[in-house]
Structures are given as structure tokens and as C-alpha cells.
Image (tube, helix red, strand yellow):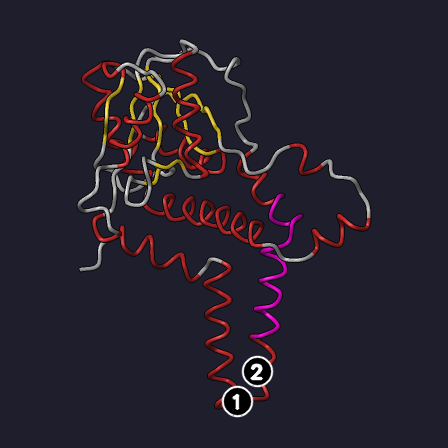
Amino acid sequence: MVDFLFLSKLLPLFFYPLGLVFFLLIISLILWWKYPRWLPIPIIIAVMILFIGGNYYFSKLLVKSLEWQYISTAEDLPNAEAIVILGGGIKPMILPRPMIDVAESGDRVIYGAKLYNMGKSPLIIVTGGRIPWRGGENLPSEADDMKELLLLFGIPKSAIIKEGNSFNTYDNAVYTRKILTPLNINNILLVTSAIHMPRSVKIFEKQNLTVIPAPTDYLVTEKDFQEEDNWQNILINLFPDSDNFNNTTLAIKEYIGIVIYKLKGWL
């Protein structure tokens, strides 16, 4: 039987902009062969998806709708019993990489270390595994790699707890709760990417944890809405851009995740 994890990775691909465009182009080829007079319809829809999904203004507003729900600064955050850092931003040390690499969302580890060094909590929990059928079977868990980075930042080994068996955000919350319960810890600073925070907060709160959001890795900032209103910027921003297209996809991924997790009763 195909498991939920596999389906949760596969099915959304058909709803992401790139997947939709690919599907529409396949339909176009079939129509070209069988019903050529209908050929323009899927092509026009595909062009519209490329234009809207890669549009600067649409992408920024869509991402902002998720990222700006829990804006805070490190100084404003209260102390908590533990800092929980979610995986998702670490590339393992595989040749020719000389060490563990930090991807875009790897800011999570850096920000978690900053909060610890500010005295926000005496304990850090790093949570995240690697999916075996996606090449992670013989690799250290993401939690292992995050721990190595935290040690490089000067965090003492005794202050770090690993959870390396989770493959999605729901697993992160469930397994983290199992670690926290024996320690009588209920109040946590949750560190993850800002775009991922709305879903993550609800999932962890569903586990009866008191969650203080500590978002990082912002894709949209105030400056993005303060660009000079000249014809050069307007013209460039109207054209589809791969970065905007990717950010639109990330936002759609989160909204799909929220719907799926609600249907599963996970948030």
C-alpha cells in the first residue's frame, strides 16, 4: 500500500505551477494530435500560470500573507524552556562539499543558536530525519547535521537534544512532544522559516504545547514594497522570474499543507 508520506510528496506536484504547466503542455500535445482546434486553450492557460506565478507583485503578496503573521525580533521574544529548531535547510556533507552546507532555510539553525546565546533558553531540540527513498538511507539525519553546526557555533553538547526520526512537520511535533514530556517541558520557542510558521504553530499547539513563534528566513521584507515606482522597475517586475516562481510555489505548498493537515486532524 502506498503510504501517506509518499502521496504527500507526489500529489501536490500536480498543483504547483510547474506541475500544472507541464500537465497542460502534455494535454496540448494530445490535442495537437487529435483535436488541433482546441490546442490554444491549454497553451493560453499555461502562459497565464507562468505569468502570474512568476510575477513579482503576485509572488510577494502571496508569500507575505504567510510570512508576516508572526513578526518579531529576537530581543522581543520571551524566554522559554526549550528552543525547537525544525529541519529542512541543511545539505549533508557529500563530496565535493567540504562540510555540511546551509541552504536558504538553514537560517533556522543560525537563529536558534543566536537565541540560545542570548539566554532565551537553556536547551535546544533539533528535529528532522531524512527520507530513505529520497537518498537519506545511508546519511546522518538532518538533526545530526544541525547538531554539528550548533557545535560549530559554540553551543555546548549538553544543551542539544536530537530527534532524527521525523519526515514531516507533523512528525516533528509528535516526536518532539515525546522528548519534552519526560522533561516536564511545555513552553517552547519554535524556530522555522517564516513561510512555514503558520502551519507549524498550529501543529505544535495541537500537541498541547505552548508555542512562541520565532520565525526566520524571510523571503519578503519591507523593502520589497518600497521600490522606486519608475517604469524600469515596473517593466522588469512584470516579467516572470524564476525566483518569484519558486517563492509562489513555496507559498502554494504551505496552503496545500494547511488544507491536507486540517483534513487529517493534525492542526
Left or right: where 175 falls relative to 71:
left
Disc 1 marks which amino acid? Tyr
Residue 12 image position (x, y, % from top left): 40, 56
Residue identified by numbered label 1: 35
Residue 59 image position (x, y, % from top left): 60, 48
Left or right: where 220 falls relative to 31:
right
Q: Would you identify the image quadrant in which residue 119 lies?
A: top left
- Crowd tier of the residue under label 1, counting other residues whose Cα lies within 10 Å: few below 14, some 14–19, many 20 or above: few
**The magenta stretch spans which residues?**
43-60
Q: Residue furthest top?
A: 119
Left or right: where 108 falls relative to 178:
right
- Crowd tier of the residue under label 2, counting other residues whose Cα lies within 10 Å: few below 14, some 14–19, many 20 or above: some
Residue at (70% x, 51% y) in the render: 237
Q: Would you identify the image quadrant in which residue 89 lies?
A: top left
Residue 194 image position (x, y, % from top left): 49, 33
Give the main secondary structure, helix, strand or loop, of the magenta stretch.
helix
What label sits on residue 39 in the rendered view? 2
Magenta-span inclusion, residue 53: yes
